[in-house]
Image (cartoon, helix red, strand yellow):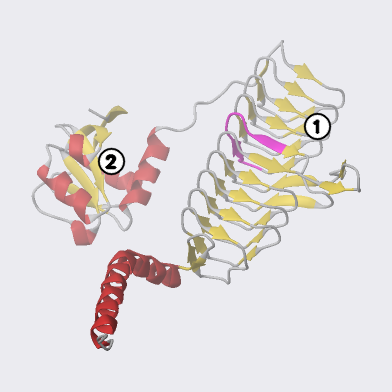
Amino acid sequence: MSRTNFPAPLSLKRIAEIVNGEIFGDPQTVVTGLSEPSTAQQGDLVFAWSKPYAEQAFKSQATAIVTSRELSRPEKPHIVVAEPKLAMAVLLEALFPPEPMPAKISPTAIIGEGVKLGEGVFIGDYAVIGDNSVIGDGTVIYPHVYIGRRVQIGANCRIYPQVTIYDGVVIGNRVIIHAGSVIGKDGFGFIWDGERYRRIPQVGTVVIEDDVEIGANVCIDRATIGETRIGKGTKIDNLVQIAHNCTLGAHCVLAGQVGLAGSVKVGNGVMMGGQVGIADHVQVGDGAALLAKSGLMDNAPPKTQWAGYPARTRIQWLRIEAALNELPDALKFLRQLERRLEELEKSLKPKSE
């Protein structure tokens, strides 16, 4: 059974206060944990944001439900909110805040010359911070993090173990970088000189704006000249590659294994499903969406949806997929027609005397 226990029992009245919801049923009903509809037991709270979830939740053994007005039912005590999934995020954020870390610098950490540390900074065992770097107030640097020279990291960031941040990278406030990510490695820049590939020095940087979250084992390359920039509030899943001189706007979402070639320009609020690939110098407009496994070779205008490889508009892709499903029957019909024509041709031939 999958269940998350609350730090302490909660009444529906208290939960409604946290999520700004309307109670139906006894406000003193108490729940002690959170569960999925399919595994809910007595004492559990369930969030239902779709019709199938609501059907399961109200038939389950759950004690109470949080759902939307259109999915509300009288069978159980419940709380009605505008957006159940958002309400779940608000509740979990209130009940399970990040564990506070003490203001401490491990004696095994290596701190370079001219490093400036803000108030309340935590630096874990064997972390390395290069010369003239700046770490903002309340930032947590976990063990075995490497931070190069002249790096700027803002306030209240969390840099998890084994993250590598190369020289000169700039990171804003409240940025989270998960384990194993590499920020600011050299871009993939080489040119054939007639005998060998000559390396093009990558002398730019990476700028990560405020409130960005970067998953595990993400690689963001520094620019050849200028900057690779990740806009504020953007969320990047695990195993994503962002090449040199790419620019991502604000509040984009990139799912796992997305790959952006060099100098891709992405607008604000763009969504990319898993394993999306984008060719170099392509531009993606504000609010565009790329479905999983799309291979985008040309510019995508704002607020358009793309799918397939090579990527087409979603409507065109659906039509092609529908046509492909009909292809076996069409081929069968053509073979039958071909045989019938052959028979007809034979029947029309004059008989030899």
Q: Report the side of 116 relative to 250 (left or right).
A: right
**Looking at the picture, which amino acid does disc 1 mark?**
Ser
**Magenta stretch: helix, strand or loop mostly:** loop
Q: Residue at x 72, y 53 (%)?
A: 262
Neighbours of disc 2 within 10 Å: few (<14), some (14-19), many (20+): few
Residue at x 85% of width, y 48% of height: 191
Image quadrant containing the C terminus: bottom left
Residue placed most toward the observer, 13 or 140:
140
Mark linked to residue 133? 1
Asked if the stretch drawn in magenta spans residue 158, the answer is no
Which residue range is magenta in the image?
Answer: 173-183
Q: Which residue is drawn at 77% across and 17% down?
A: 110
- The Cα atoms of the two marked residues, 1 and 2, are separated by 44 Å
Which of the marked residues, 1 or 2, is nearer the chain's N terminus? 2
Residue 277's spot in the image, x, y percent? 58, 53
Rendered location of residue 46, percent (x, y)? 23, 41
Q: Residue 324: x and y, percent?
A: 37, 66
Disc on res. 14: 2
